[in-house]
Image (cartoon, rainbow, N blue to C red):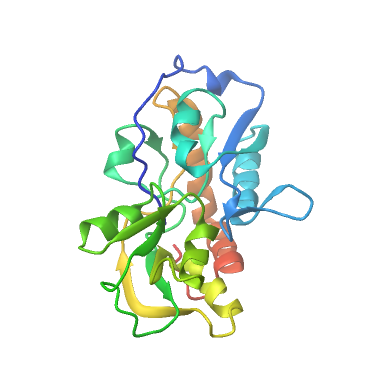
Amino acid sequence: MKKLMLATALIGFSAGFAAAQDVVRLGTEGAYPPYNFINDAGEVDGFERKFGDELCKRAELSCEWTTNEWDSIIPNLQSGNYDVIIAGMSITAEREEIVDFTQAYIPPASSAYLALSMDTDLMSGPVAAQTSTIQAAFVAENGMAVVEYATPEETVAAVKNGEAVAVLADKDFLRPIAAESGGTLVLMEREESIGGGVGMAFRDSDDAMREKFDAAITSMKEDGTLNALILEYFGPESKSW
């Protein structure tokens, strides 16, 4: 699903360090529903919370959750603020030069344009996208003007207040926003296929931990649990395994 990180690798930890920890720290954004968000109790919630907790159970790991802003989420993994990124992060060749990914747990998803009208001319003004995402890179590389914002909410607000003609983001994120707008915001027919699916990201030195989570993802795919979670959080229109 989403995001092209332009960060560079910082410092790595020694091999096996994180895997030997009593508690594995899961880092997420907490601002990208239904993937991840903060609920009324102030806790991490959403698809990735339920998915991550199940992975930790299957891998027999004790885990805790922490949040980090998107634009520094990879650098803060590298500097040791947490051990895993589980934050709707699309697998890309650029990111694989910096971090190691598990297999995808969400299939490559469509990116969609949210606008005030179905016939919006995407060349008539800037298209909003979240900073350091695959969508921001796509807009810039395809002849459209791009305006970037730090959070997903700001990209949608930019369309509402006329700062952008549309926002390009994961369709799974935009679909409920369009539905809840009462027709004020619409999903355009044009869609884009970007990225290689969503995976968990690790420091290069943490192969043992990554392999444990990879095995747990495989088990959830094989017994149908992962598809059931995708259906629960993203609905029948979403791609599954």
Q: Residue at x 34, y 39 (%)?
A: 6
Q: Residue at x 44, y 68 (%)?
A: 171
What x and y, as percent, mark residue 155? 47, 61
Q: Quadrant of the C terminus?
A: bottom left
Apparent side of residue 54 relative to residue 239 in the rendered image (left or right): right
In the image, residue 163 sits, relative to residue 68, either above or below, namely: below
Q: Quadrant of the N terminus?
A: bottom left
Q: Nearer the viewer, residue 215 or 47?
A: 47
In the image, residue 62 sits, relative to residue 191, either above or below, namely: above
What x and y, as percent, mark residue 47? 60, 56
Q: Residue at x 67, y 35 (%)?
A: 64
What x and y, as percent, mark residue 16? 49, 18
In the image, residue 58 sits, relative to residue 169, either above or below, namely: above
Could you say which quadrant of the image residue 169 lies in?
Answer: bottom left
Looking at this view, name the residue that lies furthest to the right: 41
Residue 173: tell me if it is visible.
Answer: no
Could you say which quadrant of the image residue 103 lies in?
Answer: top left
Q: Nearer the viewer, residue 219 or 1?
A: 1
Apparent side of residue 229 relative to residue 38 in the rendered image (left or right): left
Residue 171: tell me if it is visible.
Answer: yes
What x and y, as percent, mark residue 207? 43, 27
Looking at this view, name the residue that lies furthest to the top: 14
